[in-house]
Image: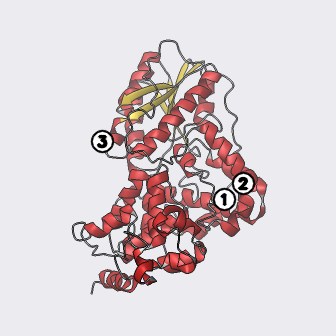
Amino acid sequence: MNVSVVLFTSDLRLHDHPALRAADGARQVVPLFVRDRAVADAGFAAPNRLAFLADCLRDLDAGLRERGGRLVVRSGDVVAEVCKVAAETDADEVHMAADVSGYAQRREQRLRRALEAEGRRLHVHDTVTTAVAPGAVTPASSDHFAVFTPYFRQWSGVHLRAPLAAPRTVRVPEGVGSEELPSHTGIASLSPGLATGGETAGRRESSRWLRDGIAAYEDIHDDLAGDATSRLSPHLHFGTLSPVELVHRARRSAGPGAEAFVRQLAWRDFHRQVLAARPASASADYRTKHDRWRSETMARADIAAWKEGRTGYPLIDAAMRQLRHEGWMHNRGRLLTASFLTKTLYVDWRIGARHFLDLLVDGDVANNQLNWQWMAGTGTDSRPNRVLNPVTQAKRHDPDGVYVRRWVPELAELDGPLVHEPWKLKGLERVALGDYPDPIVELADGLARFRRGRSGD
């Protein structure tokens, strides 16, 4: 075997990369990334993710160059560009990671047909972007699990393959043309607090987390002010970290913190196996409740206030402002803001999911869409009518108001519980808040509207 192409997609790393390891049997390897025009045309090329992707590709190229290789970058239709590179290098086969979205599944089918028509082979590798492959565990009566607990029970019993070392050398054929690596230059509307991408940063952050953070995770992962989550989701989304390796390393830590963190990694796999089996759930209700959502026109002012972090509910506003500033939001904040939009404002979950995808650097179709459905009550949640009270949740998960004061400076001088209920202030104290708004809806009114809409009354 002379030449193999390795198509990188959402697996931008050298460590624990089964597709790259499988291509080692070839004399030469073409590490290829295609800037997919269809992704941009569909509106998924959000600025924050483009910037993080640029970091990832530059870091991947640097790692390959240390090993004697380089990254080849092309733009256009993925199938057409892969076939061009395979023809230019007379490659025998192409290796890539399996993915779960409807688009990814169609892309794989198209690529397989195109390569086979040219006498080449496509090898698709699972457990590159997941710890346990979608479909590896299933219930007796279905092709996927719709409830997390029994899924997690079987997921936990799967024997994970051993992590693979990064290749020592990568030999790329001479003369393979490549575009320039992308950069942040010209990307508008970036979040100012955006994290740095790339495998180097991901491995550094994961080591720090496993050393200093994981032990206390079970006890403080919902502490909004403490910011005690791993923040590794962007690296998992872009594949600069291996889920398989991360589970192995976390389990070596042992203890309830490690168990809780591994459970979160299993949730990620759970959503991916749901989407793999039901690709339409990226945009359609997984379990419809026949909601009569308020129209986008009718709810325009409320949607704008929610996006801008000006709902009058401090914890909701803090989380939405964190999202805009960092391109990231604490998981508890994600649950609360999603509950507020879908249950309190009774706005279609797809509107919220789209806004998150516009800003989140870890904007993953499986996790984002299915978590939104879970919170909206149209997904896999067994309690579809649950509503999270933003005031009660604030007092529980930000009791001293540190998180709110960090992101809502209008309330920075308030003491005690009033930081979560500023509408209780009177007279000059209320005036001192400046233009911070009153609540856009009373919680009781929002709850009543939700119940009417969902019941069909």
The residue under label 2 is which amino acid type?
A: Ala
Q: Is residue 112 left or right of residue 149?
A: left
Residue drawn at x 57%, y 50% as measured from the top left: 130
Q: Is residue 172 left or right of residue 205?
A: left
Residue drawn at x 62%, y 43% as measured from the top left: 202
Q: Which residue is mark 1?
A: 262
Q: Which of the two labelled residues, at mark 3 and mark 1, occupies the earlier sequence position?
A: 3
Measured from the top left, where is residue 52 in percent x and y?
49, 41
Measured from the top left, where is residue 205 in percent x and y?
66, 46
Q: Which residue is mark 3?
A: 41
Which residue is more in the foreground, 77 or 402? Answer: 402
Residue drawn at x 39%, y 86% as measured from the top left: 444
The local secondary structure at tag 3 comes to helix
The residue under label 1 is which amino acid type?
A: Val
Q: Residues within 10 Å of mark 3 (few under 14, many from 20)?
A: few
Q: Is residue 382 left or right of residue 287?
A: right
**Disc 1 versus disc 2: distance between alpha carbons?**
7 Å
Residue drawn at x 48%, y 58% as measured from the top left: 322
The local secondary structure at tag 2 comes to helix
Q: Is residue 198 left or right of residue 300?
A: right
Residue 250 got which mark? 2
Q: Quadrant of the C terminus?
A: bottom left
On the question of residue 9 being in view, the answer is no
